[in-house]
Amino acid sequence: MQTPGEGYLQGEWQQQPGAIDKQLVNYTIYNFKFSCDSFFVSMQTHSKVTYGADTCMNSGQWTEYAKGKYIQRQDTVVMKGFFCNADYSLKNLGGCLRAGVYEDYFKTVKQADSMIKFTSTSSVLPLNLHLIKRTNCVPKPL
């Protein structure tokens, strides 16, 4: 069975793009869904530079997805899982964009019941997340 996870995270959280984002060469907008101890994240990237085949990079805009489990350690949310498709199925290795293991660490600061700031250990720009939909944990079998 799933474990309850963190109560304050349960639901769907969306990042609002900041004014500085559009000035950057690359930026990514995150949308998180937390259900009990599990997460699903979509990462919509915008780029002014083409890094690979345009069929993959879609003229500078593409979306990647990941799912897995998270745990909170003090002020940090540790997310470990796998890159997947939009329908939650695991992504095959060797296709477009990233595949395989997804792992990220976010320092969290709860700013209000409906607002959280996540700062990835791999980035200097914080993600200001707004609660879109609150849900309750209903543990499911693994």
Image: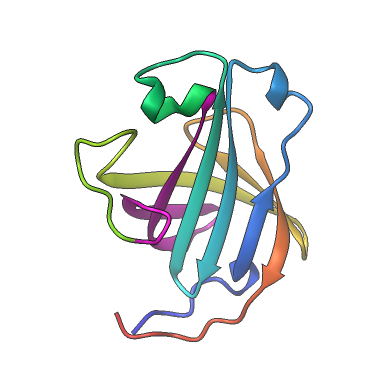
Splitting the image into 4 quarters, where does residue 95 fall?
top left
Q: Which SS type dominates the magenta stretch?
A: strand
Q: In the rendered view of the protein, which quadrant contains the N terminus?
A: bottom left
The residue at the point 50 percent across, 86 percent down is 138
Residue 63, position in %: x, y? 48, 40
On the question of residue 100 being in view, the answer is yes
Q: In the rendered view of the protein, which quadrant contains the C terminus?
A: bottom left
Classify residue 2 as left or right of residue 7: left
Splitting the image into 4 quarters, where does residue 47 fall?
top right
Residue 97, position in %: x, y? 34, 33
On the question of residue 75 being in view, the answer is no
The residue at the point 48 percent across, 80 percent down is 4
Magenta stretch holds residue 136 = no
Classify residue 122 as left or right of residue 135: left
Residue 80, position in %: x, y? 35, 54
The residue at the point 44 percent across, 71 percent down is 37
Against 113, is 142 above or below?
below
Magenta stretch holds residue 86 = yes
Q: Which residues are magenta?
A: 60-88
Q: How many marks?
A: 0
